[in-house]
Image (cartoon, rainbow, N blue to C red):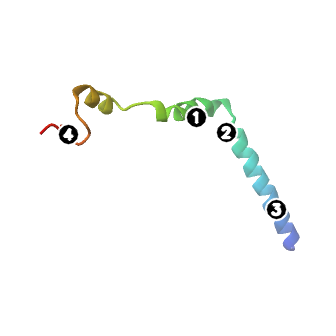
Amino acid sequence: MDINDLRIIVTVVGFLCFVGICVWAYSRHARKRFDEAAMLPFTEDDEDVSARRDGHTKQGNQNG
């Protein structure tokens, strides 16, 4: 086994990993999880919403 055989093996293993990641990323099984993760920046925590309604910030009441 010379260096060229090792290069071929590494190339094939890398390509198979790439194909495996692509199949995983575009599978229907993972789509729901990815859609939920895509909406994370737009969701608000329940504590933040209730604190804004009460007029408090995360540090507490700033009035006095």
Q: Amino acid at mark 3?
A: Ile
- Left or right placement of residue 27 versus residue 44 in this view: right
What is the quadrant of residue 2 in the picture? bottom right
Q: Which mark is residue 34?
A: 1
Q: Amino acid at mark 1?
A: Phe
Residue at 55% across, 34% down: 38
The image shows residue 55 at horizontal and vertical percentages of 23, 29
Residue at 69% across, 35% down: 26
The Cα–Cα distance between marks 2 and 4, rounded to whole angstroms, is 43 Å
Residue at image mark 4: 60
- Mark closest to the chain's N terminus, 1 or 3: 3
Residue at 86% across, 67% down: 5
The image shows residue 22 at horizontal and vertical percentages of 72, 42
Secondary structure at numbered mark 2: helix
Quadrant location of the C terminus? top left
Q: Which mark is residue 1?
A: none
Of badges 1 and 4, the one in the foreground is 4
Q: Amino acid at mark 4?
A: Gly
Residue farthest to the front, as pictured? 63
Secondary structure at numbered mark 1: helix
The Cα–Cα distance between marks 2 and 3, rounded to whole angstroms, is 24 Å
User: How many residues crowd mark 1 within 10 Å: few (<14), some (14–19), many (20+)?
Assistant: few
Q: Which mark is residue 9?
A: 3
Q: Amino acid at mark 2?
A: Ala
The Cα–Cα distance between marks 1 and 4, rounded to whole angstroms, is 35 Å
Q: Which of the two residues, 12 or 56, is positioned nearer the viewer here?
A: 56
The image shows residue 33 at horizontal and vertical percentages of 56, 33
Q: Which mark is residue 25?
A: 2
- Mark closest to the chain's N terminus, 2 or 3: 3
Quadrant location of the N terminus? bottom right
Depicted 58 relative to depicted 28: above or below:
below
